[in-house]
Image (cartoon, rainbow, N blue to C red):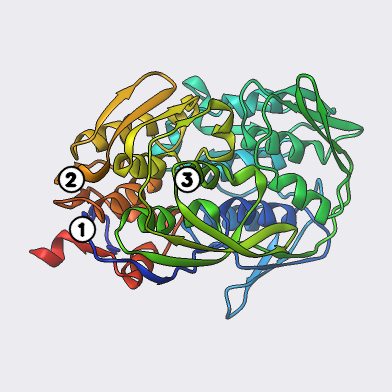
Amino acid sequence: MAGNDEPQELISFRSGPLRGTASVPGDKSVSHRALILGALSVGRTGIQGLLESQDVLNTERAMQAFGARIVRDEDGHRVVHGVGTGAFAEPADVIDCGNSGTGVRLIMGAAATQPIAVTYTGDPSLRSRPMERVTGPLRLFGARAYGRSGGRLPLTLIGARNPVPVSFESPVPSAQVKSAVLLAGLNTPGISRVLEPVPTRDHTERLLRSFGAEVATANTNGGQVISVTGHAELTGCEVVVPRDPSSAAFPVCAALVTEGSDVRIPGVSRNPTRNGLYVTLLEMGACLEFSGERETGGEPVADLRVRFSELKGVDVPAERAPSMIDEYPVLAAVAACADGRTTLRGIGELRVKECDRIDATARGLEANGISVDETGDSLVIHGRGTAGVPGGGIVGTRLDHRIAMAFLCLGLASRDGIAIDDGRVIDTSFPGFVPLMRGLGARLETSDARA
């Protein structure tokens, strides 16, 4: 990618079969959480397979600012020497979380019940995103938040000096909100609880147990209740980060729509709270084979083989959204190649991601000859099937890494190719995406290369 501040246009051209092994990077969600819990623990935490993306590196720097000592070895593994629960030092400077909503919201939770003042900021995309959904429940613990209108960054959070446990009912299915409350609850007396209406990804609960926290989950008529016992003394442990299913989604979907493709992805996470995309693709007729199922670092993983498939449109129910919230842009790209109409329901949460992903996806599809119908929380894609995707358009990424990668994947199956206005944003979550895809046979070029 470009090494300067100028946008880097990338163009994806119709390609021959994609073949080979795609070793996608470590899971972003697990990487953030492993660093934060390592910093909150006593003793040594070893982390293998950490995702070295800009988002995760910003979280690593934040933990160092709070006093944790983190060492990177020659293989990229991390050793975190934590400070213990409730022992964060007050940072000397602003905490910059770049593009990461997960990073900033989880860090706020970890710091909210410690008597320190922390100012958070991020890039233009992150500064436009709502933080009240997290600062609201953190105020219940006794924290105070002062930010821009709408609770946006830059924002200063003053941690509670005498925190109290809380019971919080989340109005939206959000793993970030749930995790922020659970992390805040670690440094309170008693038990803190979160009621979530629909189960969301459970990496925080799994890792908390690995570090020695007392966590319980119960199903009720109103949803799922997750509780954490406070004044926990976390103990450092060994964490092996599985490969990210959200990153794997891109070579998977590219192979499905590129004729003749046959791609293998080893050791990808099979966490049941993250499998919505694969359930949907199988319903569409995708040729996916999972084998060698096993456990890595407390997470189920498997090896995946994916081959080109003739797909049909489907109706994706709203209740599936929490298990595939990051995969809708690339699913929309697949739907454009399918036969018939695909309806994505209950996806309003996409409007407050790195950008308004519903609008960005719809405009990108329209620019490349795909008809769509859009409402506040749904998107209907009229797939072209054997007629093929025309392409030829330029897609505005809007500083969103998943929009960028989704349309590069679609370009591989288009007639006239698809350009994105800036490929630099991809490093937010998937460093090495372009060389990995080229290694499989994808035709990805910069505008400079064609000049």
Q: CA distance from mark 2 to mark 1?
A: 10 Å
Q: Is residue 434 rendered to the left or right of residue 203? A: left
The residue that disc 2 covers is 391
**Which residue lies most toward the left here?**
451
User: x, y (%) of residue 147?
Assistant: 53, 27
At label 1, the amino acid type is Arg
* Crowd class of label 3 (few under 14; some 14 to 19; many from 20; radius 10 Å): many
**Which residue lies most toward the right here?**
190
At label 2, the amino acid type is Gly
What SS does tag 2 mark?
loop
Q: Quadrant of the N terminus?
A: bottom left
User: x, y (%) of residue 230?
Assistant: 88, 39
Q: Viewer-proximal residue, 194 or 93?
A: 194
276 lies above or below 82: above
For the point 31% across and 69% down, the residue is 438
The residue that disc 3 covers is 281
Q: CA distance from mark 3 to mark 1?
A: 22 Å
Mark before the other along the chain sequence, 3 or 2: 3
Residue 36 visible (yes or no): yes
